[in-house]
Image (cartoon, rainbow, N blue to C red):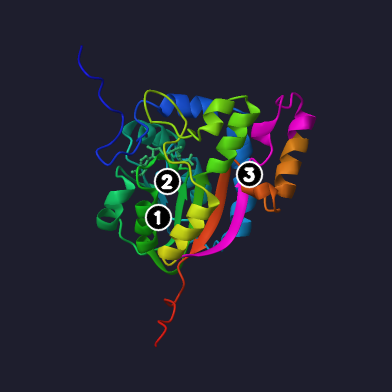
Amino acid sequence: MSEPVSPLSPAGDRHFDGLADKFAASLYGGARGELRLALLDRLLPEMLDLRGQPLLDVGGGLGQQADWFAARGHAVTLAEPSGEMLAQAREQLAGREVNVLQAPLQALPELAPGPWPLIVCHAVLEWLADPRGALATLAGLLSPGGQLSLMVFNRDALRLSNVVKGNLEKALADRLEGRGLRKRLTPISPLTHGQVEAWSAESGLVIREMAGIRVFADYLRQPPESDADRERLLALEQRYCRVDPHWRLGRYLLYTLQRPIRPPEETTA
Ligand SMILES: C[S@@+](CC[C@H](N)C(=O)[O-])C[C@H]1O[C@@H](n2cnc3c(N)ncnc32)[C@H](O)[C@@H]1O
């Protein structure tokens, strides 16, 4: 029998070819995706200084976020390595003037060097073999004063949800990450807030804002069944998504990172 072809890219990343339909149905087709978009709709204008800047959406997936920014007057370039995701993004973006580029993050310093005043990279780093190197690459694409909207899958929340579901052995062994095989949607590199803090600092980025996305929804014993309860859940998420300690256990962590206008002064002896 021949060896199955690895779904990982040569760099070890999980491009979403073979996963696009499952991702579209299981995330954006359901209540979790709706909640994520509703939260981002409120949070992005609060957390970013939006002035219609051109922006680069890295790993832009199905194009929802590109659509959101394009509708607000930004000239958007969406970069995405998966042809399957791009095909669906093109449908989502029909009628919008969005520049679409089939490329992985690692190729962007050559293909879309900018520098960019605004970069969006949502739910991508956790699918890469080297998220730390990727953050340094993103930092290099930002103009001085430029902002990066970074959203990452939260490793600590993954532990909690495993415990809540009764996967005690897995949680105790700290075997939380996926392997990127077949059609599994468990990320290969879930991140901690500590890693984001350390890697931002070493890439010369300053954390300006933080929030948790879905700080309650993924831990519910039963999903809300009525519209009134869905509204109550959204209100709770909105009220606590930037409040300590709740934001720290959001399924995703959302950050505004900024490249300072001037590099920090070198200290002289
Ligand atoms: C979970 S989806 C997120 C899509 C979109 N940003 C969103 O928030 O809905 C992860 C995306 O990252 C893409 N991806 C994987 N490896 C990548 C890489 N090296 N460079 C850029 N994107 C990558 C995948 O193909 C997939 O479309």
Residue 28 pos. (x, y %): 54, 31
Residue 193 pos. (x, y %): 54, 52
Q: Between marks 1 and 2, how big is the CA–CA gap?
A: 8 Å
Image quarter of the C terminus:
bottom left
From the image, tell me which residue sits under label 2: 125
Left or right placement of residue 165 versus residue 111 in this view? right
From the image, tell me which residue sits under label 3: 249
Q: Amino acid at mark 1?
A: Leu
Q: Which residues are magenta?
A: 205-230
- Residue 72 visible in rendering: no
- Residue 145 visible in rendering: yes
Q: Amino acid at mark 2?
A: Leu
- Front-lying residue, 96 or 230: 230
Left or right placement of residue 201 versus residue 4 in this view? right
Location of residue 196 with respect to 157 vertically, above or below: below
Q: Earlier along the polypeptide chain: callout 1 or callout 3?
A: 1
Q: Between marks 2 and 3, how big is the CA–CA gap?
A: 18 Å
Left or right placement of residue 152 versus residue 242 in this view? left
- In percent of the image, x 30 and y 38: which residue is there? 12
Tag 1 secondary structure: helix
- Front-lying residue, 253 or 157: 157
Tag 3 secondary structure: helix
From the image, tell me which residue sits under label 1: 135
Are the residues flagged by discs 1 and 2 in contact, CB closer than 8 Å? yes
Are the residues flagged by discs 2 and 3 in contact, CB closer than 8 Å? no
